[in-house]
Image: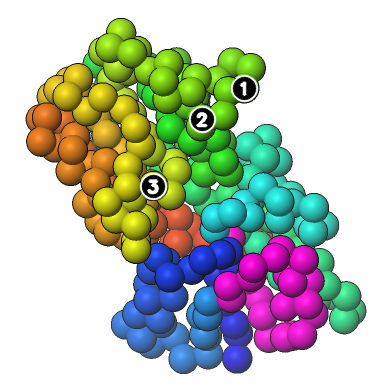
Amino acid sequence: MRKFGLIGYPLSHSFSKKYFTEKFFTEHITDCLYNNYPLKELDEFRELVVSDDELCGLNITIPYKSEIIRFLDVIDPEAEEIGAVNVIKIRRPDGKIKLFGYNSDVTGIRDTLLPFIGDNVRNALVLGTGGSSRAVCHVLKKFGLKVDLVSRERKPGILVYSDIDSEILDNAQLIINTTPLGMFPNIVSRPEINYRRLNRKHILFDLVYNPEITSFLRMGAEQGCLIISGVKMLHSQAEKAWGIWNNDSI
């Protein structure tokens, strides 16, 4: 049996197990299982890998996408540039464990945003500075967009939420939430921006996919914004991960 799974904490919000379990059923893949592995501390990761020699690949979610890198033997150049990994391929040559890190978030973000990026989108406001934010910024800069980052804590070159005035909102055609705010079960939470200042010239994209329409997206929709849920990204990055796990050449 080939086993795959998701590590992070908590994992109650995640659809990954459901997605892959349904994929295995519909595609008649009978030799694979996908499980959730909630790790309160990332130091538990090594024991997880060592204890199960059927484990072939893992997805990484909040809050370990950057911290996981210290455990890896090889990192894909794009993931290394971003500084975040959300896919691990596990190999056992000659009985020795080798861990390879990749970032499929990039594929998911690119596939999701590509239909919406035109000449009318020049500036982006990215809420959050974690591993997912790094992947988002990597893609946006490849698109040629100017990116402003927002954090709860003041850091050099990064805005805090109280800095986001009307001018900043007016100039940002694309606003992306990369934080867990609004994620199940805390579905009423949302980033603290002035939603009344938003209009139909704005595009709001939320990486949170549970619920599909978050409080952030709902507030934007009420102001006439075009909204994009994280579901498309979930599917795209999951298929990219599956491709990585099953490609013997990488």
138 and 202: which is toward the camera: 202
SS for tag 2?
strand
User: Mark 1 and mark 2: span between their CA atoms?
Assistant: 8 Å
**The magenta stretch spans residue 42:** yes
Q: Above or below — where is 215 with respect to 36?
A: above
- The quadrant where residue 249 appears: bottom right
Q: Give the range drawn in magenta.
A: 37-60
The residue that disc 2 covers is: 151
The residue that disc 1 covers is: 155
Residue placed furthest toward the top: 167
**The magenta stretch spans residue 226:** no
Residue at position x 53%, y 51% in the image: 104
Residue at position x 17%, y 24% in the image: 196
The residue that disc 3 covers is: 181
- Kind of residue sitting beneath label 1: Lys
Indicate the position of residue 165 as horizontal and vertical percent values. 33, 13
SS for tag 3?
loop
Whether tag 1 and tag 2 are in contact, CB under 8 A, the answer is: yes
Give the side of residue 97 with respect to residue 44, left or right.
right
Q: In which quarter of the image is the C terminus?
A: bottom right
- The quadrant where residue 13 appears: bottom left
